[in-house]
Image (cartoon, grey):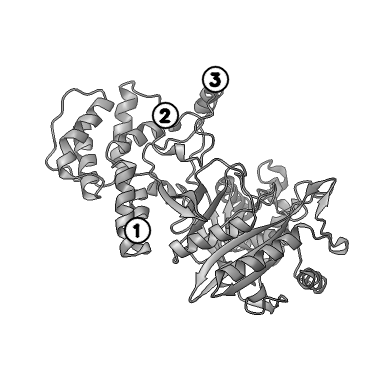
Amino acid sequence: MINKRISELIGYGIKRGLLEKEDKIFVTNRILAKLKLDSFTEYENADEDNLEVILKDILSFAVENGLIDDSITEKDIFDTEIMALLLPRPSEVIRRFNDLYNESPKKATDFYYNFSQDSDYIRRYRIKKDMKWTTDTDYGTLDITINLSKPEKDPKAIAAARNAIQSSYPLCQLCRENEGYMGRLDHPARANHRIIPVTINNSDWCFQYSPYVYYNEHCIVFNGKHTPMAINHDTFVKLFDFVKLFPHYFVGSNADLPIVGGSILTHDHFQGGNYTFAMAKAEIETPISFKGFEDVGAGIVKWPMSVIRLYGKDSDRIITLADKILDSWRGYTDESAFVFASTNGTPHNTITPIARKNGENFELDLVLRNNITTPEHPLGVYHPHAELHHIKKENIGLIEVMGLAVLPARLKDEMKALKEAILNGSDIRSDEVLEKHADWTDELKEKYTFTKDNIDEIIEKEIGIVFSKVLENAGVYKRTKEGKEAFLRFVNQV
């Protein structure tokens, strides 16, 4: 069986263009060395093309022969090393990317995206596990995902990682030193990872895809140096430089403050991709203009969060106005709207910016953020409030801001159990796992008569509605008469 799977893996690599026919014997021998095998019989009719099946059997062989422990983490490290044996060196991938880029940026990204999947850096078979649907709301069609593709750490691996010698190499999971890194019990395997260098704002940055692909061609653009997140003039320049390199991609940055920022604040990076989010489709609800910038289109977007959209053919003019808006927002206080630039020396105001090309125009969406906390809202006033935490309590980062909910894996089992409890008439409040959903369930029971035929659709729709409320909570200016007036007070003083 192992000879058959090795033959199939080599066949897979040749078919996907990961290696040439001339590499076949060499790569076979490197795989044999990894598997501690000293002989091999090639299978002529090795026709299995499903990488998950091939690797699963190779991993079973490795476990049975004592090469690795039977843990998800060790298996991931091992099969990533196996895949790395099939792959070209970074310089070859970069050369191929650049050759295709000279034909068209889209040809280059198509090649690189397919390569990142074929190499198993993006594990297609895990991404398929993610639950995905859409929900129509007043703000457009929101995307909802329950993220199941990140492997859960098994208890053995957690214990082993605790006892392992701590390493600070690479400094974080975004650093370019991850390229080719074997991985550890507490750091993902990246032996099959290849990075594309890009120059934006005359500085060395790197381009890669997210291994978790929350949306089509979900890419990460990160500073070549391990340097903290910052939102400033250079950020806007870099965003537009990237859009000019890859006009078919949008790109945005998480905010640079805790609570309203993403999960990684220590390494400056953006996220982008070939996808049109609900926020990008949302129209300008209130046209506005800024003195001295009459040549730059501007407006407040119909969106649950507070978004100023700037647009025009001249990206430099958009950047100059964005600088002015950012500087003004950083120092802006309006007590009547509960907006405080800082308290006790701690800054609160920042922006989540998103850039894109729309026809002939460049667009820049500036999402106003504030991370103030109060005793009533200790996780943040402009953050999902406690009554929504049963669905989402994590930070509202760039991806959520644009209209895609990345919900925790726990919801898969919780929603399954909740549906059964509703249909069976069980007491949800007496269930320690489901109790957090009880108030929400009571509201739904008043709205709907549940049956086994309609419950799935209703729960999905209502989770989407909760997410739209999450975004409303995260919006600094509410979509009320008072909120809109307060928003315009800020705009008019810029």
Determine which of the numbered discs, if any, sits on residue 85 in the image.
Answer: none
Element class at badge 3: helix
Task: Kindly check if marks 3 and 2 are in contact, taking CB atoms under 8 A apart as contact.
Answer: no
- In the rendered structure, which amino acid carries the disc numbered 3? Asn
Res 120 → quadrant: top left
Q: Is residue 437 left or right of residue 268?
A: right
Tag 1 residue: 108
Q: Is residue 111 left or right of residue 174?
A: left
Tag 2 residue: 74
Quadrant the C terminus occupies: bottom right
Residue 118 can be seen in this image: no
Answer with mark 2 or mark 1, whichever residue precedes in sequence: 2
Res 313 → quadrant: bottom right
- In the rendered structure, which amino acid carries the disc numbered 2? Glu
Q: Is residue 481 left or right of residue 145?
A: right
Residue 325's spot in the image, x, y percent? 71, 65
